[in-house]
Image (spheres, rainbow, N blue to C red):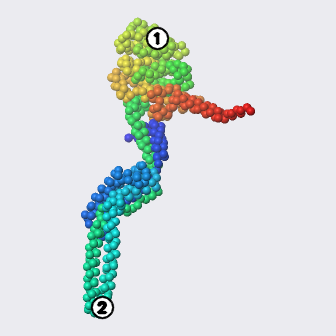
Amino acid sequence: MDINAYIKPIIKWWRLLAVTTILALVSSAISTVFQPKLYVSRTTLMIGTTISNPNPDSGQIYIAAQLATIYADIAKREPIQAATMEALGIDWLPSYNVRVVPNTQLIEIAVTDTSPQRAQIIANELANQLILQSPATNESETGQRQEFIRQQLSSLETQIDDTKKKIEELQTRLTVVNSSSETASVEKEITDLTVKLNGLYENYASFLANSQEGALNILRVVEPANLPTTSVGTSKVLIIGLAGMVGLVLATGAAYLIEFLDRTIKSTSDVERVFSFPVIGYLSVMSENGNNATYVLNHPTSLVTESFRLLQSNLEFFQAYNSAKTILITSPTQGNGKTTIAVNLALSLALSGQKTILIDSDLRRPAVHAALGVEKEPGLSDVIRNKMKPADVVKSMNGSKIDVITAGNVPPNVTEVVGSKRIAEILNGMKDDFETIIVDAPPLVISDSYTLASKVDGVILVLEPGQTREEQAKVIKEQLNRAGARVIGVVFNRVTETNAKSYGDYQYLSMYAPHHYNDYVSGSAREKELRPPSPTKKLLAFFERGEVPPDLTESLEGAFNKFQKQRQALRDRFRKVPKQPKE
C-alpha cells in the first residue's frame, strides 16, 4: 500500500486546509470573546420532615417525592415567575431550571445569569415564592391556622411542664405527711392533676397532628442560594480549538472530495496507470512573445529548447531499435499544443543534421502553414487525390533546414480522403528521401487520427496536465489498440514547476525542473509562467498552487495607494492653519 497516495491530497491542498482552519479559529474566537460569562446559583428545598423522623414511613416518603414533582412543575409556571418579578421589582427573569433530585424529595432551583449577585437573589426569591404556595405561615387562612396551632402547642407545652412539676412536688410532700386526712387530700390532688395532664397530652397530640412539625405537604429551604464565583460553560480555548479542528476536518474532506471528482491525467504515475505508456518528454510553458512554432530557432539556449533535445534523444533511442521513420503527433483534444510541438520537434531534428519533413495531415483545421507563414495550397490533399506529386507540394523553409507539406485545399469528404490507401503510399514513398517524417494529425476526438495512426511507424501523444479525464484516456487507449497503432510515448506539455509540485510529479521535479537548467547554464531566474488561469479556476488555482491572479494584486495595490493618498490629503486638511481675521 502506497501511503503517499493518501497524503498527496493533503499536501496538494494545504492552503485550503490552512485558510479554512484559520477562518474557523478566527470566527470562533470572535464569537466567544464577545460572549458574556454566565454564572449559576443554586438553592435546594425539601418536602416534609421525614428526614428528621427516626422511623419514617415508606408511604410518607413516596408521597413527599410525588409532591416534589408537582412543586417543581409549579415553579416553572407563570404565577411563580410573575410573583418573583413583582417582589424584586424587575420585568424579566433570566434562564432558570427546576428539577427534582432523583429518588428524593429535594427540589433544586438553578438560575443562570451574567451577574452572579442577581442570579443569587433571583434563586432565593423563586424558592421563597414556591414556599408561599405550600401551607406555610403567611397571610392566607391556612397560614393563620398554622400560627394559631403553634401558639396552642406552645401554651400546652408550658401547662404540661407546670402540671408535671406540681405532681412531682405533691408526690414529694406525700412522703412526709403523717395524718391520714392530709394524705387523702394530697392523693386526691395528685389524681386530679394526673387527669389534667392526660387531657393536656391529648390536646397536644391533636394540635401536633395538624401542625407543620408533622406535616408532609410543607416546603423548607435546606440549602440557600450560593454566590457563584466562577463562570460555567465550556472553556473558550476548548471551543476555539474544537472549531479549528472542525474546520480542518471539513477542509480535509473537501480536499479528498476534490481529488476524487478530479479524474484527470496530471502526473507521470497517472499516465503509467491509465495508459501504460512511458512519458518521453516534459515541455514547460513557452513565452507568448513571438512565434512559439519556431521557438527552438528563436531561443536556442532556453529550457524549452533543451527539453526538445531530450525528446529528440528519446526518439533516436526508439528509432534505433524499431526503425521508425514516420512519427505522428496527436493529442486527446484541441488546444493541447500538438502542432507547436510537431513543428518545434521537426526543427530540432533538422538542426541536429537529420533530413526532416513536416506534414500537416489535419485537413479539418490545418495550422502548420499559419505557424510557419507559408501558403496552405497546394498540399497533402492535392497529392492524395492524385492531382499533384509529393515533390511538387514540398515547401522548403530557408534557414530552418526542414521541408514542409501543408494541408492543401480542404476537400468536402475529409474522412474518405484521409482513410484512403493513398496516404500510406505517400508516407512510405517519402521514407527514402527523409530520415524522419513528422506528421501533425488531428486530435483523437476525430476518427481521422486513428486511421492515420495505423499507417505510421510510431505515435506521440501530447497531453496537458489536468486536461484529459481518465475515462477519455481509457477510450483513447482502446481505440489506438484497435487501430494497431504503435505508441512511442507521451509528451507532457505546458508543465510548470508549481503544478508539478502540486500534482506530485517527482520525475519532472528531479530532472526537468526549470531551476536545474537555469542554474547550470546562466544562473538566471526561473522562467515565468505566463499562462494566466481562467476566471473559473482562479480560486482553486490559489488553494492548489498558491497562484494569486495579477488583476487581484493590481486591484489591491491600487486600493492601498488610493487609501494612502486619501489619508495624506485628510491629514493635510486638518493640519492646515486657519487664516487669522483681519483687525
Q: Determine if residue 323 is in view.
A: no
Residue 271 position within the rendered picture, expressed as x and y whole percent measured from the top left: 40, 30
Q: Residue lying at the far top in this picture: please name it.
A: 387
Looking at the rendered structure, the kind of residue marked 1 is: Lys
Disc 2 residue crowd, few under 14, some 14–19, many 20+, Cα 10 Å: few
Q: Which mark is residue 177?
A: 2
**506 lies left or right of 215:** right
Residue 496's place in the image compared with 289, above or below, is: below
**On the rendered image, what quadrant is the C terminus found in?**
top right
Position of 72 relative to 156 (above/below): above
Residue at figure coordinates x 35%, y 52% from the top left: 79
Which residue is under mark 1?
376
Percent x, y for residue 114? 45, 51
In the image shown, does 382 or 83 lie closer to the viewer?
Answer: 83
Using the rendered image of the protein, determine whether residue 549 is visible from the camera's viewpoint. yes
Q: In the image, residue 260 lies at what x, y percent? A: 38, 34
Q: Which mark is residue 294?
A: none
- Residue 123 rendering spot, x and y as whole percentages: 40, 56
Rendering quarter of residue 168: bottom left
